[in-house]
Each structure stands twice: as structure tokens, then as C-alpha cells.
Amino acid sequence: MVAALARPGRELAKQLLMIQFGVVTLLAAGMAIAVNADWGLSALIGGGIFVIANTVFALCAFMFSGARAAKRITASFYTGEALKILITVVLFTVAYMYMQVELVPLKLTYLLALGINICAPVLFINNKK
């Protein structure tokens, strides 16, 4: 019963991550074809940073469920958010320092994935009515 309470949230997070991954992959392939391979790789890295960090957050956020686990849910949610921010900073640092990336597609794809994260849940909720 308790696991069933978190199932809709887990499914929504899974759908959102799959949409983000698909859009990032398509955009990276499009940039690789339209501009050059460096732009495609940079777009893949930028979107990948967001998708990886968001996946870690989703895993932490839905680790617990049920009213008796309210404190653990809150703690895992905040831990997931802190890890998401830390992973984002670390991955951007690695990308800037150790990789030859184009900044425009890197940041553009990151911001697109962020925009999907903001807008897509509204579309999911409105489709259920």
C-alpha cells in the first residue's frame, strides 16, 4: 500500500526523464548534423549534465513513501536537491576545465532541459483531467 502511494510520482518522474533524454539526444544529433560534431557533442554534454543530476534527484526524492516516513521523505528530498546542485557544479567544472566544449550549445541544451523540467509536469497534470 505504501509503495503504491509513490507510484504516480515515480512514473511522472520517469516520463519526465525520458522526455528530457529524448529531446537532448535529438537536439544534439540535430546540431551535429546542422552545424558540426563539436556542437553536437557540446549539446549532448550540456543536456546530459542536467539529465544526470535530475535522475539522482528523482532517485532520492522517491526513495521513501508513506505518512510514517515523513521525516525520511523530507530528508531524502533535501539530500537529493543538494546532490543535484553539487553534481551540476562538478559536471560543469569538469566540462569547462577538461573538455573542449562550445559554450553556446552546452548552455542552450542545459537551459532547454531545465525548461522541459519546468513546463512538462503542467502538461502531464492537465492531460489527466
Image (tube, rainbow, N blue to C red):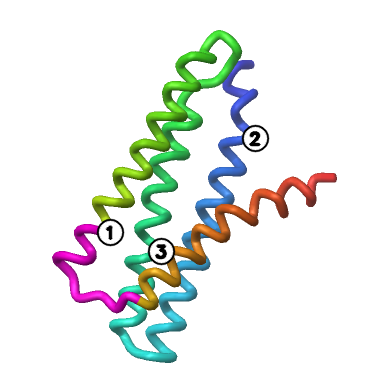
Q: Which secondary structure, mark 2? A: helix
Q: Amino acid at mark 1?
A: Phe
Q: Which residue is mark 3?
A: 47
The answer to whether the residue labelled 2 contacts the one labelled 3, judged by CB atoms less than 8 Å apart, is no
Q: Residue 12 at what x, y percent from top left? A: 61, 43
Residue shown at 38% from the left, 48% from the top: 53
Q: Which label's residue is closer to the chain start, 3 or 1? A: 3
Q: Which residue is mark 1?
A: 92
Q: Residue 110 at what x, y percent from top left? A: 43, 64
Q: Is residue 76 left or right of residue 87?
A: right
Residue 96: say if magenta: yes
Q: Residue 17 at what x, y percent from top left? A: 51, 52
Q: Which secondary structure, mark 3? A: helix
Q: Which mark is residue 8?
A: 2
Q: Residue 70 at what x, y percent from top left? A: 54, 15
Q: Residues within 10 Å of mark 1 (few under 14, many from 20)?
A: some
